[in-house]
């Protein structure tokens, strides 16, 4: 694996496409806990993708693993039938959501790692678009923001004001709370990514890249960039109950290598209840001091 070439652009590696048996460049990393129905739905979305990737599912359920149900097992079989390597494992005891992501990263050797939450369904073609975008843009991270489709009729023009395209490859950005750039997080509320795509995608355009504060739920990293900023090893520096790991990891990558969101998103939030109802502290707040 080639290391990043410095702040800014990352040069893509050649990926074998000759059926030589080389591992795919992308691995999808799915952390899950007590969500058998949602996980099966997430795997169904992956099974409909027409792109090479491996899958690693890591479970922290209180009882039976979320992947240990007939619907989930059926989707694993479909994925395997379509040529994807699927690994499932238990990761206990729990030491927080950030440590879980660190363990998933450590368990993968792929050039690109797609962190996909267990309550996100991906439209066909989404993994391919993310991989195409991160390699073409040469940045460290690309995300497809989750869309809550129950809000399709709830368009929020005021929350679209911070939208700005990347007209060229993303450049490194250091973001700070209280700045206009930080307010880009509002672009991902409700079904706003759907409304943004309708407004800003140009005729014949497969996808567009835009400036973000961070993206939750579906985030593809260039592994070299993520590891260059320490990955999720900051789990050791915060309490187990800390959340907000996406904000820290993505913004650290963006500050050195740049990052973007893409439209159309293709990531649909299942809008199930959260498995983390209590969020007393955020890693971002703690680490900023």
Image (cartoon, rainbow, N blue to C red):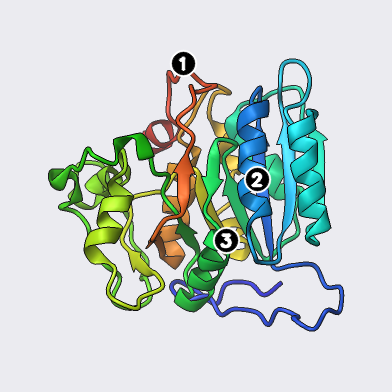
Residue 233 is situated, as x and y percent measured from the top left of the image, at 61, 42
- The percent position of residue 27, horizontal first and vertical second, equals 69, 57
For disc 3, the marked residue is 127
Report the Cα–Cα distance between label 3 and label 2: 13 Å
Point out the frontmost of discs 1 and 2: 2
Q: How many marks?
A: 3
CB under 8 Å between discs 3 and 1: no
Q: Is residue 150 above or below residue 134?
A: above
Among the two numbered marks 1 and 2 on one chain, the one whose residue lies closer to the N terminus: 2
From the image, tell me which residue sits under label 2.
44
Sequence order check: which comes first, mark 3 or mark 2? 2
Q: In the image, what residue occupies the spot 80% across and 67% down?
A: 23
Query: Is the residue marked by circle 3 packed among few (<14), some (14-19), or many (20+) residues within 10 Å?
Result: many
Q: Nearer the viewer, residue 275 or 227?
A: 275
The residue furthest right is 21
What mark, if any, has residue 126 been given in the picture? none
Q: Earlier in the sequence, mark 3 or mark 1?
A: 3
Q: Quadrant of the C terminus?
A: top left
| Position of 23 relative to 186 (above/below) | below
Task: Using the numbered discs, state the Cα–Cα distance from disc 3 to disc 1 in whole angstroms.
Answer: 31 Å
Residue 259: x and y in percent read 42, 62
Please rate how many residues cluster around mark 1, counting C-alpha atoms within 10 Å: few if below 14, some from 14 to 19, many from 20: few
10 shown above or below 119: below
Depth check, front residue: 62 or 126: 126
The residue wearing badge 1 is 278
């Amino acid at each position: 694996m080639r290391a990043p070439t410095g702040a800014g652009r990352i040069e893509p590696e050649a990926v074998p496409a000759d059926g030589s048996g080389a591992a795919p460049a992308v691995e999808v990393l799915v952390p899950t806990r007590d969500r058998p129905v949602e996980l099966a739905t997430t795997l169904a979305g992956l099974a409909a993708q027409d792109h090479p990737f491996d899958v690693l599912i890591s479970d922290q359920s209180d009882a039976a693993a979320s992947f240990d149900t007939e619907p989930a097992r059926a989707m694993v079989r479909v994925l395997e039938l379509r040529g994807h390597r699927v690994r499932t494992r238990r990761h206990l005891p729990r030491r927080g959501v950030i440590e879980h992501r660190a363990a998933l990263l450590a368990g993968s050797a792929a050039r690109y790692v797609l962190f996909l939450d267990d309550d996100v369904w991906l439209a066909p073609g989404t993994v391919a678009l993310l991989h195409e975008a991160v390699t073409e843009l040469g940045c460290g991270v690309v995300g497809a923001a989750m869309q809550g489709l129950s809000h399709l009729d709830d368009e929020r023009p005021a929350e679209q004001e911070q939208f700005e395209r990347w007209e060229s490859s993303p450049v490194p950005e250091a973001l700070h709370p209280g700045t206009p750039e930080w307010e880009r997080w509002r672009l991902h509320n409700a079904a706003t990514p759907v409304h943004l795509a309708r407004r800003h995608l140009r005729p014949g355009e497969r996808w567009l890249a835009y400036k973000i504060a961070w993206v939750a739920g579906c985030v593809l990293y260039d592994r070299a960039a993520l590891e260059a900023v320490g990955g999720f090893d900051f789990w050791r520096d915060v309490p187990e109950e800390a959340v907000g790991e996406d904000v820290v990891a993505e913004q650290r990558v963006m500050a050195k290598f740049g990052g973007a969101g893409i439209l159309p998103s293709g990531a649909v939030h299942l809008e199930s209840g959260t498995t983390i109802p209590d969020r007393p502290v955020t890693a971002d707040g703690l680490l900023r001091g």
